[in-house]
Image (spheres, grey):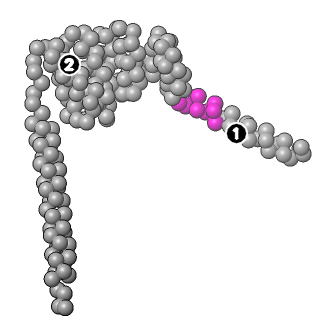
Amino acid sequence: MSTKTRRNIIIIIAVILALLILELIFRPKVVRQAFAEPFYRAKKYPQAENLFRKNSTKNDAPANANLAKCLYRQNRFAEADSAATIALNSAKDKKDILYDRGNIAYKQQDYSKALRDYKEALLLNPEDDDLRANYELTLRKMNKQPPPAVGLQQNKDDKKKEAIRNILEGLDNKESTDRQQLRSKQSLKTDKWW
């Protein structure tokens, strides 16, 4: 290997190291977040909590949401609720945080708050089946029946009616083509002039 090639390799390595050092200096939250996630996945919640807590500020919704999840896993529900509320106040996408806060309220047996959070999250994400199941479970816990899903039931009824209508139209079309084929066969048989 020539000296020129070695020098180029050393320069490339130095640039990469400089970029990593700059990342560590100017974006320590990203680095701490990256270190905290493996702890969380490994269920080492106290270590993950320390790193998430260092990241959490009033305007950092993801850091506070992660802190709330970590505290929830440690059964520290009051602190988790506080962190989730802070995250909710600064979050752009609120549905996941509302879902988590509903779970926290449910564990605290504050079913009316859990119901409010689940309902608000359902309004933001009506297709989430887990969220709907938690909402209905909370209603049952409060000895209430879930409200009839008028819009959903009406949509299901409309879809059923449309499917039946499509089947009937298909059968009508099939019947008319069968009649036309039968007429053409009959006209061939009767059109014999000899």
Figure check: 160 above or below 55? below
**Which is nearer the N-term, disc 2 or disc 1?**
1
Magenta-colored stretch includes residue 71: no
Q: Position of residue 46 (x, y in %)?
A: 47, 10
Are there few (<14), some (14-19), or many (20+) residues within 10 Å of tag 2?
Answer: some
On the picture, is 2 further left or further right than 97?
right
2 and 1 marks in contact (CB < 8 Å): no
On the picture, is 148 further left or further right than 124?
left
Query: In the structure shown, which secondary structural element does the residue marked by tag 2 occupy?
Result: helix
Q: Residue furthest front?
A: 194
Tag in front: 2 or 1: 2
Residue 15 is labelled as 1
- Say which quarter of the image contains residue 12: top right
Figure check: 27 above or below 36? below
Residue with the mark numbered 2? 137
Are there few (<14), some (14-19), or many (20+) residues within 10 Å of tag 1?
Answer: few
One can see residue 113 in this view: no
Q: Position of residue 185 (x, y in %)?
A: 20, 76
One can see residue 55 in this view: yes
The residue that appears at 49% across and 19% down in the rendered structure is 41
Mark 1 residue type: Val
Q: CA distance from mark 2 to mark 1?
A: 56 Å
The span shown in magenta is: 19-28
For the C terminus, give its image quadrant. bottom left
Magenta-colored stretch includes residue 25: yes
- Say which quarter of the image contains residue 170: bottom left
- Say which quarter of the image contains residue 35: top right
The residue that appears at 59% across and 28% down in the rendered structure is 24
Mark 2 residue type: Leu
Residue 155 is labelled as none
